[in-house]
Image (spheres, grey):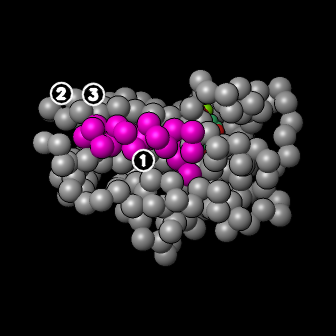
């Protein structure tokens, strides 16, 4: 039905929490139960800004901390026309990371406040549901070595969740914390049920703006 918009679902989490797998499983489950659904990931690694972000994440280049934060944010704004168009067509979107990762990964850096980090993402399409896949550091370590990219270190993986906790407080956002230490199937089941609930309750409410 044309007046029904798609639901905007975000998957957040720290390294090895399984966001990507859960995103794929969720899209598959939604599609096989008659919904339209698509996954987008941030950083989106195929646009102009992403060349710069890829080489930064691969530690091939250095960028000033504020500057790289704004590029991550620009990489999201680039996708806003697509996000709005898809939602208007009734497609449910599953975003693998979003502004919350942007804020969390920058605000652990020295001398950059959480509040400064949020500003460049104010006004992005506001998610209807944010699923935070929680994983303790020990469980993450048990899933194997971290990768070789920037930020994939134990210290960062300890600090970043604290920033996510900050972001969960006090804002008018629909966060759900999901225990990511369980099997893929168990996590998927919870993610699927929470997402379906959101799809049913948000289909007719207008899309809002983040942190505004
Ligand atoms: N990351 C991701 C940021 O630092 N800022 C952002 O705005 C976003 C969206 O990129 N370690 C970091 C978090 C991850 C890294 O993500 C790449 P992934 O999910 O490993 O491709
Ligand atoms: Mg990674």
Q: Which residues are magenta?
A: 77-99
Depth order, front residue of 76/10: 76
Mark drawn on residue 179: none
Which residue corresponds to the image point at 76% horizontal and 27% vertical from the top-left?
Answer: 55
Using residue 27 as the reference point, say whether residue 58 is left or right of it: right
Question: Residue 100 lies in what quarter of the image?
Answer: bottom right
Residue 63 visible? The answer is yes
Q: For mark 2, does the 10 Å Cα neighbourhood hold few (<14), some (14 to 19), or many (20 or more) residues?
A: few
- Quadrant of the rendering where the N terminus is positioned: top left
Return the residue at label 2: 32
The answer to which of 182 and 187 lies nearer the viewer is 187
- Residue depicted at 35% across the width and 57% down the height: 207
Q: Residue 163 in the image: x percent, y percent? A: 62, 61
Marks 3 & 2, CB-CB < 8 Å contact: yes
Point out which mark residue 10 bears: 1
Per the model, the C-alpha gap separating discs 1 and 2 is 20 Å
Q: From the viewer's perspective, is residue 64 above or below residue 202?
A: above
Residue 179 in view here: no
**Residue 75 percent coordinates (x, y):** 61, 39
- Residue occupying image coordinates x 73% and y 57%: 108
């Amino acid at each position: 039905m044309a007046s029904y918009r798609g639901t905007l679902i975000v998957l957040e989490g720290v390294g090895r929490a399984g966001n990507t797998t859960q995103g794929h499983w969720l899209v598959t489950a939604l599609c096989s139960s008659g919904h339209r659904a698509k996954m987008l990931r941030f950083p989106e690694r195929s646009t102009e800004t992403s060349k710069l972000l890829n080489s930064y994440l691969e530690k091939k280049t250095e960028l000033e901390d504020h500057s790289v934060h704004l590029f991550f944010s620009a990489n999201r704004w680039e996708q806003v026309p697509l996000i709005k168009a898809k939602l208007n067509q009734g497609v449910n979107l599953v975003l693998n990371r979003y502004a919350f990762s942007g804020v969390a990964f920058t605000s652990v850096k020295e001398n950059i406040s959480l509040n400064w980090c949020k500003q460049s993402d104010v006004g992005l399409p506001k998610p209807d549901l944010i699923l935070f896949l929680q994983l303790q550091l020990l469980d993450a370590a048990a899933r194997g070595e971290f990768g070789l990219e920037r930020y994939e270190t134990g210290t960062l993986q300890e600090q970043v969740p604290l920033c996510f906790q900050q972001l969960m407080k006090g804002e008018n956002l629909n966060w759900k914390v999901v225990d990511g230490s369980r099997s893929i199937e168990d996590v998927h089941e919870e993610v699927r049920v929470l997402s379906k609930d959101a799809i049913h309750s948000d289909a007719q409410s207008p899309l809002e703006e983040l942190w505004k």
